[in-house]
């Protein structure tokens, strides 16, 4: 059994930021991640990030990851890599499977869940052919493992993930034959879309994949137009040659551990579905469990880092390393910055959903800082 | 295009044709502001709220190009209509390998990737501080001045 004051599950931008704040305050921290290397999504992100300069915008995601890692190493934060947390008990004990062959119990006074999100799949005839994959998987292949998944890629989904991965596939030397979007409007930021458009990639709105063909690998795809209620319009099909289909059809927060722990949930579709209720200190309905990052709603690395800091500071306050007063002041500063990040056309909807979450959280969660 | 012309960062016609000028094609309120700090002449303003659109003070811009690689959206370029009698100049961000070389003849494209004309590469700058966003300068026929914004990816 491993004992620690604060166990953090997930070493993405949220988990790393939480660990850094809590460790700086003096808490004993154990950071657990199933991967061999910390960083979460960041190490696949070779593009320069948005966000404010204060959130390292204009820096490539991979370099933000490196910087957070360096900081966490300097602080001597303990890590448990290749450790998958498979269970949670009494809001205190984590069951970790290490290297897929060894199991270990971690006993923690406080827990922060920063497990991120997982890609949604869509099904169509032929969807199980090799060559059809999540956009995130394609991104890992090109940016981490440096292999091209194919030469002619069809991207399904025009949100930021779809257009960013399309651009990175072009950079890696592939051709993107088309980006399809089921909605009548493109989803991603205009500047990302424009990069891909000026590379000559056609965009089809109100379109989806009807089926994929191939013997041992996808060779062609039939696409079809959709009406306003997303029904396929017969007679509008046409065939496109493609050896790879990437699905960028949204992300869903990875909330299993919060379910297992018995946290209460709230349904907020604008943030990705059922989410663990939390208050403005990122505390869930379980006194000792905090959440931060994409698990609380699909957003961005910049917001994930700020939420991580909130959770880290408030968990450290619970443990007695930061005074309640100081935790409050610092939390308020972080909220100002979060509200700033959640403004404008794209941020507003997330802001409104987050406000609903906080309202519920502050009502339901009455735990006091001791 | 119409939306673009209305944005507070797009120069009016007179200014656009008067000499070298930085142009920002960033017309959505996204949470982003590195362009503001990149300009040491204070020509670009975003302000307190990080989702404000960038505003450009065309009097202050000296077309130095520092903002081009700083923008994560690759949304900034510099154009010069007055470059020569027949040719205009464009400096734009380019993140594909291989990079073009000086004197290469390349295909100039519009916002949809359509090839409009041929262009000659005048300069390629890729110092370490650009963090892998090269800035390529091309000359191209004046009649395509407004439409051309990049070149076809070299394979
Ligand atoms: C293509 C793409 C482009 C993006 N571009 C931008 C951008 O330009 N700007 C921006 O701000 N954001 C961007 N993002 C979003 C950003 O990457 C995410 O919002 C951010 O990584 C979320 O951070 P996180 O720490 O919550 O989760 P993650 O980064 O997903 O980290 C979670 C970690 O937890 C681990 N984990 C999960 N469950 C367990 C378990 N049971 N046991 C152990 N470990 C576990 C995971 O393996 C992972 O390492 C982009 C995302 C994608 C996919
Ligand atoms: S070109 Fe130079 S002066 Fe003009 S806006 Fe960009 S950084 Fe500022
Ligand atoms: S850096 Fe680029 S994308 Fe960001 S606000 Fe400025 S112009 Fe827009």
Image: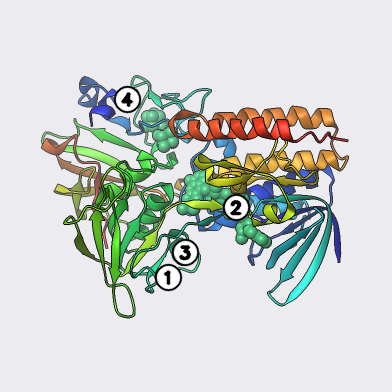
As helix, strand or loop, the secondary structure at mark 2 comes to: loop
- Nearer the observer, A267 or A195: A267
Could you tell me which residue is drawn at 35 percent across and 27 percent down?
B62
Query: Which corner quadrant of the figure contains ligand 3?
Result: top left
Q: Earlier in the sequence, mark 1 or mark 3?
A: 3
Against B101, residue A369 (above or below) is above
Chain ID, mark 4: B
Left-right relation of A203 to B141? right
Q: CA distance from mark 4 to mark 3?
A: 37 Å
Looking at the picture, does residue B31 appear above or below residue A284? above
Q: Quadrant of the N terminus of chain A?
A: bottom right
Residue identifier under label 3: A137
Quickly name the residue at label 4.
B7
Q: Chain of mark 1?
A: A
For the point 75% across and 27% down, the residue is A329
Identify the chain of the residue marked 2, using the numbered disc in the image: A
What residue is drawn where x is 32% and y is 57%?
A: B99
The CA distance from mark 1 to mark 3 is 11 Å
The residue under label 1 is A147
């Amino acid at each position: 059994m491993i004992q620690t004051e604060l166990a953090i599950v997930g070493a993405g931008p949220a988990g790393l930021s939480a660990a850094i704040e809590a460790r700086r305050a003096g808490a004993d921290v154990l950071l657990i991640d199933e991967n061999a290397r910390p960083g979460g999504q960041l190490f696949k992100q070779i593009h320069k990030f948005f966000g404010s300069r204060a959130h390292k915008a204009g820096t490539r995601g991979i370099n933000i990851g490196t910087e957070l890692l360096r900081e966490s190493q300097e602080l001597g934060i303990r890590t448990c890599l290749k450790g998958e947390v498979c269970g949670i008990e009494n809001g205190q004990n984590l069951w970790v499977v290490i290297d897929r062959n060894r199991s270990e119990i971690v006993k923690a006074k406080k827990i922060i869940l920063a497990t991120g999100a997982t890609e949604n799949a869509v099904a169509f005839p032929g969807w199980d052919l090799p060559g059809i994959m999540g956009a995130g998987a394609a991104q890992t292949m090109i940016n981490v493992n440096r292999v091209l998944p194919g030469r002619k890629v069809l991207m399904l989904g025009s949100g930021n993930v779809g257009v960013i991965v399309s651009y990175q596939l072009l950079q890696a030397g592939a051709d993107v034959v088309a980006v399809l979007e089921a909605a009548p409007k493109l989803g991603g930021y205009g500047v990302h879309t424009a990069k891909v458009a000026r590379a000559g990639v056609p965009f089809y709105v109100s379109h989806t994949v009807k089926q994929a063909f191939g013997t041992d690998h996808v060779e062609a795809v039939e696409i079809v137009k959709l009406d306003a209620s997303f029904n396929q319009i017969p007679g509008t099909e046409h065939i496109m040659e493609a050896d790879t289909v990437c699905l960028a059809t949204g992300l869903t927060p990875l909330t299993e551990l919060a379910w297992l722990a018995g946290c209460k949930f709230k349904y907020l579709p604008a943030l990705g579905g059922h989410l663990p209720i939390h208050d403005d200190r990122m505390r869930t309905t379980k006194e000792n469990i905090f959440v931060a990052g994409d698990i609380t709603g699909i957003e961005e690395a910049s917001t994930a880092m700020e939420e991580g800091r909130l959770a880290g500071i408030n968990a450290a306050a619970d443990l007695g390393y930061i005074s309640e007063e100081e935790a409050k002041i610092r939390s308020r500063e972080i909220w100002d910055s979060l509200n700033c990040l959640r403004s404008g056309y794209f941020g507003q909807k997330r802001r409104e959903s987050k406000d609903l979450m906080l309202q519920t959280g502050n009502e339901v969660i009455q735990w006091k800082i001791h | 295009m119409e939306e673009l012309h209305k944005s507070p960062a797009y120069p009016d016609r007179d200014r656009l044709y008067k000499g070298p000028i930085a142009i920002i094609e960033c017309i959505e309120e996204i949470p982003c502001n590195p362009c503001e700090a990149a300009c040491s002449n204070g020509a670009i303003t975003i302000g307190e709220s990080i989702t404000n659109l960038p505003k450009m003070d065309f009097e202050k811009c000296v077309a130095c190009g520092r903002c081009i690689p700083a923008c994560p959206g690759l949304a900034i370029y510099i154009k010069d209509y007055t470059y020569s009698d027949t040719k205009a100049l464009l400096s734009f961000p380019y993140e594909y390998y291989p990079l073009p070389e000086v004197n290469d003849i390349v295909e100039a494209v519009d916002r949809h990737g359509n090839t409009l004309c041929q262009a000659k590469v005048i300069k390629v700058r890729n110092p370490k501080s650009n963090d892998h966003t090269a800035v390529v300068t091309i000359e191209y026929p004046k009649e395509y001045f407004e439409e051309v914004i990049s070149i076809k990816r070299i394979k």
